[in-house]
Image (cartoon, grey):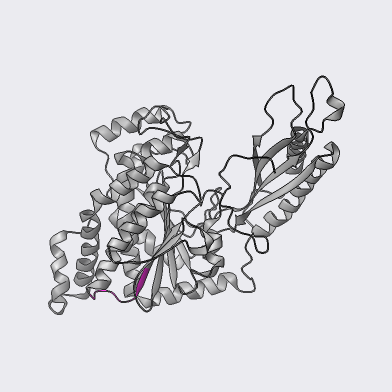
């Protein structure tokens, strides 16, 4: 950790070596984040408690935007035709460096901040991917950088992107399409995890769709021949998709849930809905598999004499890794990692680990892992950003080691002081990494050259349909057309 008193060196750089001046300015970043530590955690906790669905994060977005506005950022709300998306900009001129923030929660994962499964009352949602921490830490880092721009230590522009609906809503894809990243020189992101990692990792591309079937209701016993079951159409579609799995490329993922399937067994369902994801490390493969999945749904409708509505929600591309930027983040994460559990946190972690399938040593929180070359089995709309601008990210240990995301255990840890420790480390790592880019334009030049090499001969083609609007209602309960 940087020592606070050394920050005065930046006022007397003519008396010290360059490395000492660097030390002093980065120490000022660290002190800025520590000074705001309690306030940042309060915002993260409020967002954790709100647990708002994708595209409905009205209060969560407001909390972050108002904090940034109070710090002097220029706020643009409702960007990309999304009420809960915003940008916050400070400074002027080049370089323009972006920081990504998220704040949507997941359904079916309500949980208190305790090491036993105990849902919270009044909500079905929970921050099982730690986006309450993600947005708050990125905000804190952006403010720390803005303070140094204000005092003349740095020159350029820092921009925070308030990104809604990362969990299946593809919010950033619509922000990319709106041109909001076009003037950026580089973009950084981070994510809560059970361990600290950085490197030029990638992920799976993803397409999402809701197939809705309209049939004809009838008495299931008295007049079954007069009914046309929308649920039967879904069952055929799902069975066909299972058969499709056998004939897809390696690393393909196809998964679904039935969101509506009727109300009573003695009534032939006249409406039913199924929600599908298709994933693969290559977005071109996703496009191909999706066209085949659509045929499964069309076959289900044909066989049951029902009508199919394809509600395509969009998709996200695989992340184009950037090793130049990743190595800067990795170096800072290694230098700044100071996570250390208190006695109470150790007891919390050990109790929670009794519920995990594959618990890991608590000692891993003091380690930093190089994730270069890894392909995550998850998906993120950060991928689309990475296709147009050099992008890199990292993770910090906000969950108990061995915890998987999208679990009640992740919600519990993310609402505890364990989550706070990881969040504060992320803020300091992000700020130090951004500082390096502002001070060393050669890093940005090398990152842009690497990015140009990755996209040579390829064009950015989002997994959107022509003129597709953001699916602002994708978390709403299904209703018949």
Figure quadrant of the C terminus: top right
Figure quadrant of the N terminus: bottom left
Residue 126, located in which quarter of the rendered image? top left
Answer whether residue 204 is magenta in the image: no
Residue 214, located in which quarter of the rendered image? top right
Q: Please tell me which residue is depicted at 68% across the width and 64% down the height of the picture.
A: 466
- Where residue 285 appears, x then y in whole percent? 69, 56
Q: Nearer the viewer, residue 11 or 446?
A: 11
Q: Please tell me which residue is depicted at 41% across the width and 30% down the height of the picture.
A: 121
Residue 144, located in which quarter of the rendered image? bottom left
Q: Please tell me which residue is depicted at 22% across the width and 60% down the height of the picture.
A: 32
- Where residue 467 appears, x then y in whole percent? 65, 64
Q: Nearer the viewer, residue 134 or 126?
A: 126
* Residue 360 visible here: no
Looking at the image, residue 411 lies above or below residue 151: above
The stretch in magenta equals: 152-158
298 displayed left or right of 18: right
Q: Nearer the viewer, residue 345 or 307?
A: 307
Looking at the image, residue 39 lies above or below residue 326: above
51 displayed left or right of 4: right
193 displayed left or right of 278: left
Q: How many marks?
A: 0
- Where residue 230 appears, x then y in whole percent? 76, 35
Residue at the right extreme? Answer: 225
State whether the magenta stretch is mostly helix, strand or loop: loop
- Where residue 415 appears, x then y in whole percent? 35, 39
């Amino acid at each position: 950790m940087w020592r606070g008193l050394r920050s005065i060196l930046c006022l007397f750089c003519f008396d010290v070596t360059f490395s000492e001046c660097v030390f002093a300015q980065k120490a000022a970043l660290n002190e800025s984040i520590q000074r705001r530590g309690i306030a940042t955690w309060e915002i993260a906790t409020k967002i954790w408690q709100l647990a708002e669905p994708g595209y409905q994060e009205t209060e969560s977005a407001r909390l972050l935007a108002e904090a940034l506005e109070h710090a002097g950022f220029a706020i643009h709300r409702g960007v990309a035709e999304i009420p809960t998306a915003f940008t916050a900009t400070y400074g002027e001129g080049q370089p323009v460096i972006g920081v990504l923030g998220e704040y949507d929660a997941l359904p079916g994962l309500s949980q208190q901040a305790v090491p036993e499964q105990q849902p919270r009352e009044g909500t079905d949602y929970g921050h099982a991917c730690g986006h309450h921490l993600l947005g708050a830490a990125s905000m804190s880092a952006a403010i720390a950088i803005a303070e140094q721009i204000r005092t003349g230590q740095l020159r350029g522009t820092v921009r925070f992107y308030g990104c809604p609906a990362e969990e299946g809503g593809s919010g950033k894809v619509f922000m990319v399409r709106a041109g909001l990243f076009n003037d950026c020189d580089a973009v950084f992101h981070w994510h809560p995890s059970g361990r600290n990692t950085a490197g030029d990792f990638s992920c799976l591309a993803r397409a999402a769709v809701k197939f809705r079937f309209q049939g004809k209701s009838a008495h299931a016993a008295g007049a079954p021949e007069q009914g046309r079951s929308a649920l039967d159409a879904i069952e055929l579609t799902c069975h066909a998709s299972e058969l499709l799995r056998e004939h897809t490329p390696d690393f393909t993922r196809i998964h679904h849930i039935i969101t509506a399937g009727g109300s009573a067994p003695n009534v032939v369902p006249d409406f039913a809905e199924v929600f599908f994801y298709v994933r693969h490390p290559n977005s071109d493969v996703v496009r191909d598999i999706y066209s085949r999945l659509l045929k499964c749904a069309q076959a289900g409708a044909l066989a049951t004499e029902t009508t199919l509505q394809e509600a395509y929600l969009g998709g996200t591309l695989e992340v184009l890794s950037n090793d130049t930027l990743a190595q800067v983040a990795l170096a800072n994460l290694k230098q700044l990692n100071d996570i250390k559990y208190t006695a109470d946190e150790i007891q919390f972690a050990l109790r929670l680990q009794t519920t995990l399938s594959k618990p890991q040593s608590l000692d891993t929180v003091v380690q930093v892992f190089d994730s270069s070359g890894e392909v995550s089995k998850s998906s993120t709309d950060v991928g689309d950003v990475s296709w147009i601008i050099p992008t890199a990210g990292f993770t910090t240990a906000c969950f108990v080691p061995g915890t998987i995301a999208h679990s009640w255990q992740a919600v519990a840890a993310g609402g505890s002081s364990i989550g706070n420790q990881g969040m504060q480390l992320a803020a300091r790592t992000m700020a130090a990494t951004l500082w390096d880019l502002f001070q060393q334009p050669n890093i940005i030049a090398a990152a842009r050259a690497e990015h140009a090499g990755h996209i040579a001969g390829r064009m950015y083609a989002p997994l959107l349909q022509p003129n597709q609007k953001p699916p602002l209602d994708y978390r709403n309960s299904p209703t018949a057309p």
